[in-house]
Amino acid sequence: MSDGQHSKFTFAQFESLRKYSTTNPLRVIAHIDLDAFYAQCETVRLGLDPNVPLACQQWQGLIAVNYAARKFGISRHETITEARKKCPGLVLAHVATWKEGDAKWDYHDNPDIATHKVSLDPYRRQSQLIFKIFYDSCGKVEYGGLDEAFLDLSMLVYEKACAEYSKLAALLYLKQEEGRMNDFMPLPEISQEGLTWDGELVPLDPDKDTPDRAVDWDDVLFMLGSKIIKGVRNKVRYELKYTCSAGIAQNRVLGKLCSAYKKPNNQTILRHDAVRRFIATLNFSKIRGLGGKLGHEISRHFSVPEDGSIPFLLQISLQDFVLALGDETGNWLYNIIRGRDASDVKPRTEIKSMLSAKNFRPNIVTYQQAEKWLRIFVADIMGRILEFGNSTPGGAIRIPKTLVLHHRHANAGSSSRQIAIPACQSSNLEDTLFHTAKVLYRQIEKEKEGSMYPCYQMSMAVSGFDSTVSRNHAIEGFLVKSATKFEDVEESVEREITQETSVAKSSPSKKGSIDEFLGREQQLSNNCYVDAGLNCQDTADGKTASAIGDSSKSDSDIDSFVCSDCAKRIKFEDAEEHQDWHFALSVAKKFRQEKEHQSQPSVPPPISQNEKRDTAVKRKAGNSVCNGPSSKGPKLEKGQRKLFG
């Protein structure tokens, strides 16, 4: 411990690391992102050297490109023919598919879009193995998608600092006993042997020689955090053969920005004194929450230039932001472009939704064809229900409560219906889902009076999961089939349909600034977990949370779903932006709770519903504005695109 000058941090701030306080200036947050994850999965599966150029193929397009292939100028925006012209030795690995009539996905030779459906199960399974390492290494992990996670290292670095600096632990105990926790800490020993940075340091000032040594306790904790994350990344690499990149900073927003700073297979540490210079080099749309329509409206309203967008916005006063955007949104924008964020790392232990979908080319024209795909949808979802149960403590099998079917006619619009799934045991859940789906499909046929075909797209989703079945009960249930009669199932389904013949419409959005920017009728939960790659969790900075689309189709090819968080109907094409909406709501609550303790807001809460705005940024009714932290749907990196069966 250094004598003389004291630290700028207090013992109380250091001690609050144990409580994961989101306003603690000493907190350490990491974001880990797998490098070109889908392509890595195929490289590992095929036993190839990572330096071999490889791209993931879906039909005649590319949906992921590894870094070796990117050196040849190959991107996901080109065809197989174009890619092979650039790199004749390119390995093309077609994604796994479900074949019409089969009960399990496989890696088929020459899969046909007319008879096969894309499966993400291989990537999902590898993701579970990776996340197990994350969970084993850190007590607070947030799922950010199949290939990304946030880790709150605050407790871990607190413990390691006390272990590294025994005098600190003793002094901390003394201050607690004396009731002097608001005293400033002494400066750390900057010559501590073995305590070094693991990773790339964002320079404090690129034009000057600045010290890399630790100066204060925030630097020491970042050093310790960098060692923890290096160990996690090494474990993923040596045990599973995957490389990942990471960012280590004081909050989630900065951590995610840093993880992309030195890709691939690297990690970046952003010290407090380097934040402003670092963030000023970025386009403001790269910041979580500013990549969607909100960002476009801000850009239009303030005439934000493409280059130097953040330095430009930094010149705008808080009052001007509030005048244009309202109190809370204006405060949030003012703080976020300065790198201030107090959003929490939220562990996710439950799934909210699962979806399986298929675009038909050519269109299907008979009920018999539709029934085969309903069977595949059910098998797809059941596989994930069982897999998720096996990966959770106790191995509980989750039973969904609600089933949604969506049908899109090739020329005459679309229909969606939802129904409560009849009560059943795990032993006959698959049959119950299949029979319920068939009855619901027949009901849609009846309502449309035979005008169902040609059918261009279908999807099935389940939500409202219970976790009441233990592993022992689940095993017993699968060995002994239940005697549930499907006549009863049909009666139950049809009775429910009579009561509710369509998915509940969302109520008109209330007027107010938050609805102007972040609230829309079409919304999607940022907690969905769907086959189409809906990575509904923090995804906006890079990982899209919209359903993964056909390589030749846009997101708008997928229609709508019901948000399990706000119960409103949304379009999948607005999923990414809707995440910002839920993100804004969550931080709004945090903002209100902490506002009285802070002289200036540091988190992005949405503005109140009833607030009047003199100069509001206008929106067209019905549009949605959002973009979640990707981070990341599957997050779409440079070499990755959207997938849809």
Image (cartoon, grey):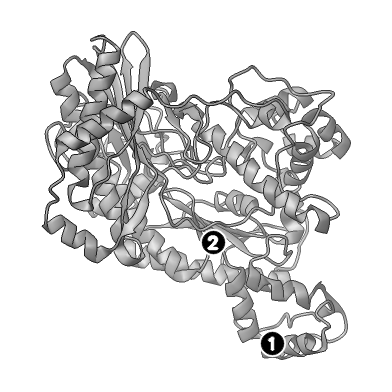
Picture quarter containing residue 516? top right
Coordinates of residue 635 in the picture (x, y in percent) = 46, 42
Residue highlighted by disc 2: 151
Kind of residue at disc 1: Ala
Picture quarter containing residue 195? bottom right
Residue 429 visible in the displayed image: yes
Sequence-earlier tag: 1 or 2: 2
Query: Residue 96, relative to residue 302: is it above or below?
Result: below
Kind of residue at disc 2: Leu
What residue is rendered at 36% in x and 30% in y?
418
366 or 331: nearer the viewer: 366
Coordinates of residue 397 in the picture (x, y in percent) = 29, 56
Coordinates of residue 174 in the picture (x, y in percent) = 77, 90
477 with respect to 33 (left or right): left
Residue 61 image label: none
Residue highlighted by disc 1: 169
Q: Secondary structure at mark 1?
A: helix
What residue is rendered at 81% in x and 37% in y?
327
Query: Residue 491, relative to residue 396: is it above or below?
Result: above
What residue is rendered at 81% in x and 40% in y?
314
Q: CA distance from mark 1 to mark 2?
A: 24 Å
